[in-house]
Image (spheres, rainbow, N blue to C red):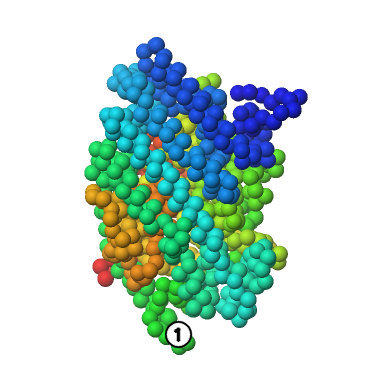
């Protein structure tokens, strides 16, 4: 790696030199848009140079001189330039993009896909990998996993195809990569294009002060008079829950659920059809019947039949209760003398909230004053400290890519440096919706034995502060924070030799276990009492309010389960296709998830065209993973309920056997080492309060 010459007047691309920042974190304050393309192209050149060295090595192929070098985990930062710039660029595309970055991504996508294909389809390189696979020395578990992944990665990328097949695979993967990017860019533009501007204060009826203040701030920032509502969840969710204006709820609902269906450049319908077919063609070219068969070979579920068994078991267990829940909401609406007609989808959140108030006298607005963001941060960090002994210290010298972002140093229980943690809390123009965890740098142990620690980032879209109030969160937003923080712990505790096996680099139906596990704490009394204090008075959340939170934890739980199952069914329907997909997306969607649906659907809305997880987010043929992992997390948390939710011994076992191990062994082996047995659905059913009688009725 080059070093900075302070006497040199010409500017050097910051990706080409040591960053000179705390812990070598990305120097966002020095990176310019034009730096990315230059760094990508130089990174590709260096990759090619290194591959040539491996291919032309005259020594007998070994694990050390071939597999480790191919995996790019030897601590050679010169060779690592491509992943360096890729990690930063991909985060910017999701969290802080603009037209210039979007255009650059379109330009680079086919180049990067071609380069990846050049590596995976390099015949001489694969011959060396295959030789090691067949003639290797005795390996430990982690080394064997790396070797298996490396060999299978080549095979699953077409290494065994003939030249015609390899060329066809290149065409398919390059097109799929570009379309996935286009899908995401269209979705972001469509979501940000819609606003509902209210100028008549009477039309704010029912909305709490927090929603009004946020809408007034949004209007002000847009240079408009009135109150502006958007499709970002902190704006959309409260509007659908509290607004008494049924026609305006309908307008918001239809805007949200027809995104990317309109007759414009952002229509994703044909992109989805093509992506489904491309993935099917890729799988069949590689010898699989369907794309789902291709994906599930390396999942805990193993095959399509096991996925459907899980989804069918959940339907059997939860659908009867879900139908009752919907019926109760309909009864609540019928009790409203001012409303005529049947319940519509834009009525559900409003009247389910009314039902929840009637039953538990609790709603999100009651809780907001006790969930001030800085206190929530203290609570979440405090939970990590109580479980694992780690501490967080904000470091304002670490550069960030936006003023909203906070950067922390994380220290282990012995005081040693563990990781860098970034937190990006609020929605903004260039930011995708939802929440996710990513890394600017993974963890690995370099060739000199240095344990390179990770730089982990959590990106969310939480309620923003206003001129009158700090950021006050809902309980759902607290759960989101805990969820993404669980992913970050998986990354921060990583302690493996190879980066491609560290942290969240695990099978997709295992990766949600650490995140969903953390959500359990959101409704635990002893956790809430550690941080839930009124932002004005400093008074702790009353015991009665906490009790109501706990009692209401399973409100609409069956409905929520069926919603997730319906998405899983839709995903599987697309990716178990053996023949070309030529159906109408909207009608196919309605039929695919029909057996999990508990509310009549509209024919003119569409989920598929905005379903990033299965179209552009890596969850194709894998959305069931959330429910699969929910079985795991309920089963795992039952250990903590038995031993104490803050029990340090149980937490250490969870860290040692799951969080720190990454993908070094089969996930079921890791889970059984922690739990002592394989998981069952029993703990999930019990946690959700579903009885045997409920399941039969």
**Residue lying farthest to the right in this orientation:** 7
Residue positioned most to the bottom: 337
Q: Secondary structure at mark 1?
A: loop
What x and y, as percent, mark residue 8?
A: 73, 25
Residue at 45%, 73% (x, y): give it. Answer: 346
Q: Position of residue 595 (x, y in %)?
A: 28, 64
For disc 1, the neighbor class at 10 Å (few under 14, some 14 to 19, many from 20) is few
Q: Residue at x 49, y 73 (%)?
A: 251
Is residue 51 shown left or right of residue 136?
A: right
Where is residue 174 drawn, in percent x and y? 40, 40
* Residue that appears at 39% across and 61% down: 607
Q: Is residue 576 left or right of residue 237?
A: left
| Residue lying furthest top | 58
Front residue of 571 and 508: 571
Residue 679 in view, yes or no: no
Along the viewing direction, whichever of 611 and 151 lies nearer the viewer: 611
Please tell me how many numbered marks the rendered image carries: 1
Q: Is residue 509 visible?
A: yes
Q: Quadrant of the C terminus?
A: bottom left
Which quarter of the figure has residue 603?
bottom left
244 shown above or below 371: below
Q: Quadrant of the N terminus?
A: top right
Q: Which residue is mark 1?
A: 339
User: Height in image: 285 above or below 614?
Assistant: above
Image side of residue 132 versus residue 413, left or right: left
x%, y% of residue 173? 37, 40
The answer to whether 663 is drawn above or below residue 337 in the figure is above
552 and 486: which one is in front? 486
Residue at (31% x, 61% y) in the render: 584
């Amino acid at each position: 790696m080059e070093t900075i010459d302070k006497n040199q007047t010409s500017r050097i691309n910051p990706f080409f030199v040591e960053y000179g920042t705390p812990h070598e974190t990305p120097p966002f304050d020095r990176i310019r848009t034009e730096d990315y393309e230059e760094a990508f192209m130089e990174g590709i050149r260096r990759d090619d140079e290194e591959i040539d060295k491996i291919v032309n090595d005259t020594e007998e192929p070994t694990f050390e001189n071939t597999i480790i070098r191919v995996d790019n985990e030897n601590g050679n930062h010169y060779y690592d330039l491509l992943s360096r710039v890729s990690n930063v660029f991909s985060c910017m595309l999701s969290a802080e993009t603009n037209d210039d970055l979007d255009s650059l991504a379109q330009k680079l996508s086919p180049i990067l896909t071609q380069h990846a294909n050049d590596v995976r389809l390099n015949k001489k390189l694969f011959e060396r990998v295959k030789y090691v696979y067949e003639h290797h020395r005795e390996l430990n578990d982690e080394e064997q996993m790396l070797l298996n992944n490396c060999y299978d990665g080549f095979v699953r990328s077409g290494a065994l195809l003939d030249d015609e097949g390899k060329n066809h695979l290149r065409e398919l993967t390059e097109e799929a990569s570009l379309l996935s990017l286009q899908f995401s860019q269209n979705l972001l533009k469509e979501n940000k294009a819609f606003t509902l501007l209210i100028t008549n204060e009477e039309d704010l009826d029912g909305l709490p002060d927090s929603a009004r203040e946020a809408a007034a701030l949004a209007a002000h920032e847009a240079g408009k008079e009135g109150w502006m509502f958007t499709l970002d969840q902190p704006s959309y969710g409260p509007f659908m829950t509290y607004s008494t204006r049924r026609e305006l709820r309908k307008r918001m609902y239809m805007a949200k659920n027809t995104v990317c269906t309109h007759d414009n450049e952002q229509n994703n319908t044909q992109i989805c059809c093509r992506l489904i077919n491309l993935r099917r063609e890729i799988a069949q070219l590689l010898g699989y019947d369907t794309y789902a068969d291709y994906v599930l070979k390396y999942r805990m579920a193993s095959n399509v039949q096991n996925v459907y068994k899980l989804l069918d078991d959940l339907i059997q267990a939860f659908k009867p209760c879900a139908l009752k829940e919907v019926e109760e909401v309909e009864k609540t609406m019928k009790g409203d003398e001012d409303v005529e007609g049947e319940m519509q989808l834009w009525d559900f959140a409003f009247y389910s909230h009314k039902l929840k108030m009637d039953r538990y006298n609790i709603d999100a607005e009651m809780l907001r004053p006790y969930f001030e963001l800085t206190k929530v941060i203290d609570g979440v960090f405090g939970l990590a400290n109580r479980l694992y002994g780690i501490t967080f210290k904000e470091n304002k010298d670490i550069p960030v890519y936006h003023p909203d972002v906070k950067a922390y140093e994380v220290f282990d229980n012995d005081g040693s440096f563990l990781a860098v943690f970034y937190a990006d809390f609020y929605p903004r123009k260039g930011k995708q919706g939802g929440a996710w965890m990513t890394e600017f740098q993974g963890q690995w142990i370099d060739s000199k034995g240095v344990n390179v620690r990770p730089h982990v980032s959590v990106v969310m879209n939480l309620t923003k502060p206003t001129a009158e109030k700090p950021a006050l969160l809902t309980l759902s937003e607290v759960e989101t924070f805990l969820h993404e923080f669980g992913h970050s712990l998986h990354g921060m505790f990583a302690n493996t030799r190879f980066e491609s096996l560290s942290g969240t680099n695990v099978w997709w139906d295992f990766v949600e276990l650490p995140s969903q596990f953390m959500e359990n704490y959101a409704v635990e009394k002893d956790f809430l009492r550690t941080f839930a204090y009124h932002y004005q008075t400093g008074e702790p959340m009353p015991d009665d309010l906490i009790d109501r939170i706990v009692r209401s934890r399973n409100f609409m739980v069956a409905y929520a389960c069926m919603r997730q199952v319906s998405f899983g069914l839709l995903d599987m329907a697309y990716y178990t296709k053996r023949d070309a997909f030529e159906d109408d997306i909207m009608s196919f969607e309605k039929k695919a998830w029909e057996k999990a649906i508990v509310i009549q659907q509209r024919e003119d809305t569409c989920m598929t065209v905005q379903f990033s997880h299965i179209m552009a987010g890596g969850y194709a043929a894998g959305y069931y993973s959330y429910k699969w992992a929910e079985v795991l997390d309920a089963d795992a948390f039952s250990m903590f309920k038995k031993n104490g939710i803050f029990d340090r011994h149980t937490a250490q076992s969870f860290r040692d056997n799951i969080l720190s191990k990454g993908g070094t062994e089969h996930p079921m082996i890791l889970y059984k080492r922690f739990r002592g047995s394989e998981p069952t659905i029993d703990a999930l059913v019990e946690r959700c309060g579903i009885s045997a009688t409920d399941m039969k009725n």
